[in-house]
């Protein structure tokens, strides 16, 4: 039986989902194949996150990734999705300095990658910048709690809002982002009970990553949930596959088969008509060809 055609996910649809208590599914993607997987799996929101810096570009943190790199990755993602809402993450340095810079950067992401909305991390000047971008006509997703671009100032990659004072700051950040028009807010690494209490005060959908089950939706990093990243992952990551292991096994087997001359097999080679092959061999056997040296090689007339 054919599946009913999915409609593109819009901002009103996300608000509707939150109102109906229907969980919103968001995942990151950074290239064409990951975007296609997200599309096929039926996710609602695809984030071209600046975690790309770490998981696909190999930087030690998210700080170094440039706008050019985010644009290149975003364009590839756009080619792979039709249905989910596409969010472009504003890289560090692309929005903090002024409202003009923030609007220009958001416009660049939308125009060049085809993302429909942008995301920026809370902290410092972010509320003002979010307001400016929303006023320019581009919807903004906020991000509170553990904000990796400013992790150093937060004391490292740590759970946020563990004290009443910290939770109040988080709540104020989230309310401020909502008040300037953010249509949704990511909650990262926040104790579940604090996230639940803050989410209940907000009208906009909240998307949690390490924030417990009470947020309107959940987001995970593609490479973490599929086990493409190796080494330690945060407590909030659930691994649904071990793709790194499968890839390493596959490439290892290929290496082994090439070295032992078991690959390619007859199924992997192209054939040629025997008469054509015989003609070609006759050409190669001509005296004028076999006696020619590499250094006086010129095409035969
Ligand atoms: O950049 C990213 O992938 C993110 C998610 C962790 C929410 O911001």
Image: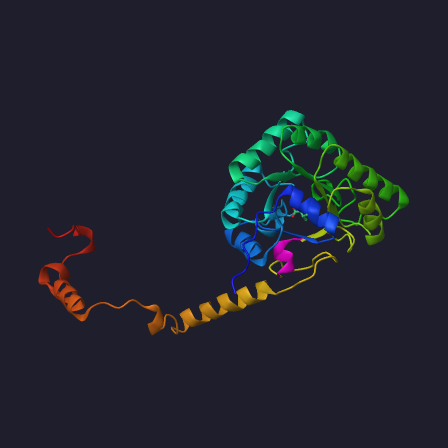
Give the tally of numbered discs. Answer: 0
Q: Which picture quadrant has residue 68?
A: top right
Q: Is residue 114 left or right of residue 220?
A: left
Q: Nearer the viewer, residue 13 or 192?
A: 13
> Is 114 included in the stretch rendered in magenta?
no
The image shows residue 54 at horizontal and vertical percentages of 62, 49
In this rendering, position of residue 84 left or right of residue 177: left
Residue at 86%, 41% in the rendered image: 168
Q: Is residue 255 above or below residue 164?
A: below
- Please indicate whether residue 25 sits to the left or right of residue 167 in the image: left
Rendered residue at 16%/64% (across/down): 280
Across and down, in percent, residue 263 comes to: 39, 71
Of 24 and 263, the residue lying toward us: 24
Q: Is residue 288 visible?
A: yes
Q: Residue furthest right?
A: 164
* Boundaries of the magenta span: 220-226
Above-or-below relation of 108 to 252:
above
Tell which of 137 and 295 is nearer to you: 137
Quarter of image, res 226:
bottom right
């Amino acid at each position: 039986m054919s599946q009913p055609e999915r409609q593109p996910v819009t901002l009103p649809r996300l608000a509707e989902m939150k109102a109906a208590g229907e969980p919103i599914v968001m995942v990151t993607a950074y290239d064409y194949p990951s975007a296609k997987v997200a599309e096929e799996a039926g996710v609602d929101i695809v984030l071209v996150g600046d975690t790309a810096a770490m998981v696909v570009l190999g930087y030690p943190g998210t700080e170094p990734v440039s706008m050019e790199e985010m644009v290149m990755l975003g364009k590839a993602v756009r080619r792979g999705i039709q249905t989910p809402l596409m969010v472009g993450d504003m890289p560090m340095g692309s929005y903090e300095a002024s409202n003009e810079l923030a609007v220009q950067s958001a416009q660049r992401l939308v125009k060049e990658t085809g993302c429909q909305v942008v995301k920026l991390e809370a902290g410092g000047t972010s509320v003002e910048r979010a307001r400016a971008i929303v006023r320019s006509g581009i919807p903004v997703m906020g991000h509170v709690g553990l904000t990796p671009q400013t992790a150093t100032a937060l004391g490292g990659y740590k759970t946020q809002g563990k004290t009443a004072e910290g939770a109040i700051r988080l709540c104020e950040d989230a309310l401020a982002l909502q008040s300037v028009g953010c249509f949704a807010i990511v909650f990262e690494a926040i104790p579940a009970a604090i996230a639940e209490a803050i989410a209940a005060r907000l009208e906009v959908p909240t998307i949690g990553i390490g924030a417990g089950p009470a947020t309107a939706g959940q987001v995970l990093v593609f490479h973490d949930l599929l086990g493409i990243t190796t080494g330690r992952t945060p407590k909030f990551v659930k691994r649904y596959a071990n793709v790194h292991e499968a890839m390493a096994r596959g490439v290892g087997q290929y290496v082994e088969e090439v070295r032992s001359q078991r690959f390619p097999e007859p199924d992997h080679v192209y054939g040629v008509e025997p008469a054509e092959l015989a003609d070609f061999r006759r050409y190669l056997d001509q005296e004028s060809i076999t006696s020619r040296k590499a250094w006086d090689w010129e095409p035969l007339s």
